[in-house]
Amino acid sequence: MARLKSPADLERKRSQILSKRAPNRPCITVCSGTGCHALGSDKVYQAIVSEISGNGLKSKVDVRRTGCHGFCERGPVVVIFPAEICYLGVKPGDVPEVVSKSSLDKGLVDRLLYKDASGERIAHEGEIPFYKHQRRIVFGNNRLIDPKNIDDYVALGGYSALAKVLFEMSPEEVLQTVKRANLRGRGGGGFPAGVKWETTRDAPGATKYVVVNADEGDPGAFMDRSLLEGNPHSVLEGLIIGAYAIGSHQGYVYVRQEYPLAVSNLALALSQARTYGLLGKNILGSGFDFDVGIHRGAGAFVSGESSALMTAIEGIVGEPRPKYIRTAVSGIWERPTNLNNVETWANVPLIINNGSDWFTSIGTEGSKGTKIFSLVGKVNNTGLVEVPMGMTLREIIYTIGGGIRQGRKFKAVQTGGPSGGCLPESLIDLPVDFDELTKAGSMMGSGGMIVMDEDTCMADVARYFTNFLADESCGKCIPCRVGLEQMVRILDGICEGEGEAGDIELLEEISEVVQDVSLCALGQTAPNPVLSTIRHFRDEYEAHIEQKRCPAGVCKALISYYIDPNTCSACRICLRECPVEAISGGKNLVHIIDQDKCTKCNTCFDVCPTRFSAVVKISGEPVPAAPPLGTEVVRKKGKRE
């Protein structure tokens, strides 16, 4: 790698890279994000390389590992360019057929294609509903780039935005461009990035820092991780541009220790950027100096809060501190520090290259651009989706996500991570942007989106997230430390059938105190799951307290299982599968559950053949008396014969 000393050198390098690549030559790409890696994509890649070599195709077919494609549950994902033939769930044994057919235009491997609800096979990635309705301006290059090869990023125009700002724009012009774009922070409250940059730039002191917040701790969220794993140079380029606008010469990436692939790919990207002269002293011969260090977080959720993150970088325990002075003015070592999350920085090169008017043409009046969401839970198509701000929850969940699994009824969706709110079916046509979610009692957060069906207990959901936040509280301030513990205690009682009149009102009262006087955003937003579920599902709380009944049949203390003797077929499946041997019966004999032995694990309910549905879940009612042991099943013509 030769050091690039000017924008002209960068363009010559780009031309050299492209001259060695035949755009129409088949290229087999293998997703190597964490999800696909866990499903065996490394073995698939090795099998493809071996097959290509063994058949003398190295000069005719390229092979490339890429970042996450987003359709994580259907991995390993293999896409063959330029036709964009997409294969899902590929195994090493499928490779010979994939190579012999698709790489040489001899046909398709039908069994590996996406199949829609009507049974139709879809061959091209862009036509699969999960991808078709997205707008992947930030995340899209993940599928084209080997994150370990800087040349792949440069070939697609990488670092052209950096060259533009260093040689064609003043720091003030860069800052104003970002402000006009109204880029709002993608990691939490949606504060305008340009305003924050300006505050740090104008703060007193010559030494200023810029930081990438990659401490993504929300359960079920992996947007930032996948960007940092799959396209680290896009984040790095945005960070350097921000540093130039602010007047910073040192940056940090605060990344979770639990993200080893992201750390590895980022470290390699930093090394390659330094070698090319895109990082370090005299970047591209511009006279601008800037370098980046990696700080590995210890996994504390609270360290995602700005002041806690900065104390951790200083080598101190990651605890929040009072923000009498904002971190943009007094952050790391009391120096002005600008903090944005991974996705925010990755948007910056796009804004510089395409202009603020292009960016503001996407989205809603107050929320511009796109947003990447982690769509998980009881939805058919789970994974990462990037959509324009303003797309409705219905479009995301049903058009892209394919609707609710097993044809069940949609009940709620939680947005914004553990501190977000749960939105009911009545709000499913809500446009998703910063302001609309906040009005509805939720938040954008970093982009978590957990879909729930009719079998979800909302009181139990509130208990889960409140317990998570209580565990993650640093304990520094009393409202958060004690308040959340008391809320968990009350929620435990409600879910255990020990709820009392006044518990709902007490939860609301404690929530108000925690929100108003907690030190940091963790405590200030922690009551959201409780308040939103009370607001939209108060009847479920009342059923738990007044009727000792869990409407969703989830809370173990409030449910029992009973085998209906009129529908039991004596198939013995539940008897064999019961982990505690609480079921008795035999061939042609009605099965009976011993209520004293039953641990309410739900196994019998899950395994009972749906055509019989003999296992009944009961909540809030006495368990019917079981027939005597040895009672024979009643045979009904056409049903059990």
Image (cartoon, grey):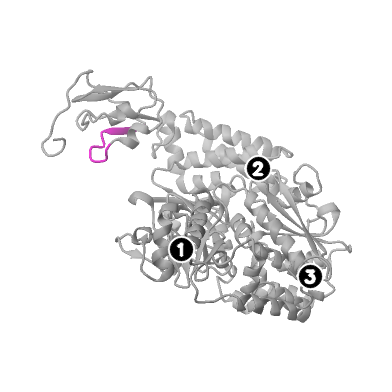
Identify the residue under disc 3.
Answer: 244
In the image, residue 521 sits, relative to residue 476, either above or below, namely below
Task: Give x and y (percent) for residue 600.
Answer: 40, 29
Q: Which of marks 3 and 1 precedes in the sequence? A: 1
Q: Quadrant of the N terminus?
A: bottom right
Say which of marks 1 and 2 sits in front.
1
Q: Nearer the viewer, residue 523 or 17?
A: 17
- The span from disc 1 to disc 2 (Cα, nearest Å) is 69 Å
- Give amino acid for label 1: Asn
Q: Which of marks 2 and 3 precedes in the sequence? A: 3
Q: Is residue 154 left or right of residue 464?
A: right
Q: Secondary structure at mark 2?
A: helix
Q: For label 3, count other residues whose C-alpha is less than 10 Å away and answer few (under 14), some (14-19) or many (20+).
A: many
Visible in this render: residue 263? Answer: yes
Task: Give x and y (percent) for residue 413.
Answer: 47, 52
- Which numbered circle lies on residue 55? 1
Say which of marks 3 and 2 sits in front.
3
Q: For label 1, count other residues whose C-alpha is less than 10 Å away and answer few (under 14), some (14-19) or many (20+).
A: few
Q: Is residue 13 left or right of residue 392?
A: right
Q: Secondary structure at mark 3?
A: helix
Identify the residue under disc 2.
Answer: 513
- The span from disc 1 to disc 3 (Cα, nearest Å) is 50 Å
- Give amino acid for label 3: Tyr
